[in-house]
Image: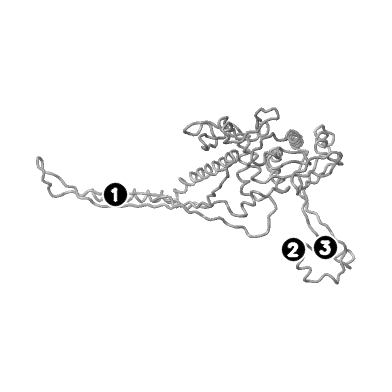
Amino acid sequence: MARAYMILSLVCLWGGGCAFGPQSLMRTHGRYNAAYQQVDSEELLLNIVRLRYGDPPAEVEVSAIAAQYELSASVEARPFYGMESGSNIFRSFSTVLPFAGAGGATRPTISLTPVNSSETIARFLRPISPEGVVFFAETSWPISTVFRLWLEGINGVPNAPSASGPTRGFPPEYADFRRIVELLQTIQDRGELTFRKVEEETLSDPIATDRVTGETLLEARKAGYEYRLTADKKAWQLVTKCRRVYLDLSPRTLNSAEYTELILLLNLKPGLTRYEVTQSTVGFIEQRPNIPPSDKLILVTRSLIQVFYFLSHGVAVTVEHLASGLAKATFEPDGRLFDWNKVTGDLFIVKSCRGKKPPQGASVAVPYRGYWFYIDDTDHATKSTFILMGPSRQLDLGAVPSGRRGAGPVLTLPVGR
């Protein structure tokens, strides 16, 4: 009988070992995924709240998770001692009982990388390119959302430029820009608006064949240029390739009321179905009177940190913190408190409340300065914007400078004994 117990115990341990191996991935992968998603979302929300209070943001990236699993098992035979009736004297053991023990442990090693390399900082501070704006506009997010987030203005029409940094005391200008993106969204929803990226070539004046050598051709190719013979084969021309972005409109849009209002607000040439999309390199340019209508959409773009500052004005700062000066207040010209919901209300709202635990119904919640700041789980507009900002932190959609990317230090934490 004792031998049968021992064999049964070994079979149980063997079965437990198999479940602890391959099946451990099934039991833990989802949990690690959920934990990382929660931590990453909380870090993003916390940084946005910090900016609203004028505090510096900080990011620590989980670069690796290495989970180690350990299984221990033991089997032994233990003597069973009896005792004479009415006596305190042990008699010799006459029975052997099997004893089996098993234990398991998981010791994850988590590598954390502070996001503070020079290239990462430049990515946060570098304005997005027009191609980057179009990249987001080609996704499922509405063009009105993309433009309100990533643009300071179009053709001199401001999109709350004073909100792209620390909170100012005066209200931002935003009304005309909001109307512009509403018109663009209406036209896009009708399927009458699209962006196109076109690669175009520019040819130089003819160059004599004796001035172009094999070395010249090779150097041009390395630099991204190309020499091409003219049609009569008697000269060379230097070919420069560039990518341009255009906003194309359907011809039927030209007769719509939205188009008529749009070209007036943006000072565009009427009657065109294609407008080149360019970027201002000197910052925000205000509209000036007597400027002739343009065939271009001149974008003033934001950097990632400017977008975060813009969104931070959607944080519901408490009256207590505004009165004490912990958070800066914005006032109307008549002295009334400016309502930032006019700017970010249908785009991004972070609520606040007191309590020892996260509020019920919160999609993401973080504690800060004695309050809980959270995104309501039923606020789908805010959740959609928040989802968009997650991967945006990892993309570099500005002009990439030359040079090698620097890497920050890696902090490795063995979690366990």
> Is 319 located above or below residue 193 in the figure?
above
Coordinates of residue 254 in the picture (x, y in percent): 84, 36
Disc 3 and disc 1: Cα gap in Å?
82 Å
Q: Residues within 10 Å of mark 2 (few under 14, many from 20)?
A: few
Which residue is outermost to the left? 86
Q: Earlier in the sequence, mark 3 or mark 2?
A: 2
Look at the numbered disc 3 and give the secondary structure of its residue.
strand
Image marks 2 and 1: residues in contact by CB distance under 8 Å: no
Judging depth in this view, the residue of 409 and 226 nearest the camera is 409
Circle 1: residue type: Ala
Which residue was labeled with disc 1? 100
Say whether residue 377 is visible.
no
> Is 126 located above or below residue 49 in the figure?
below
253 left or right, relative to 376:
right
Q: Nearer the viewer, mark 2 or mark 1?
A: 2
Look at the numbered disc 2 and give the secondary structure of its residue.
loop
Residue, x 68% and y 56% (percent of image)?
Answer: 401
Coordinates of residue 361 in the picture (x, y in percent): 53, 31
Which residue was labeled with disc 3? 238
Which residue was labeled with disc 2? 223
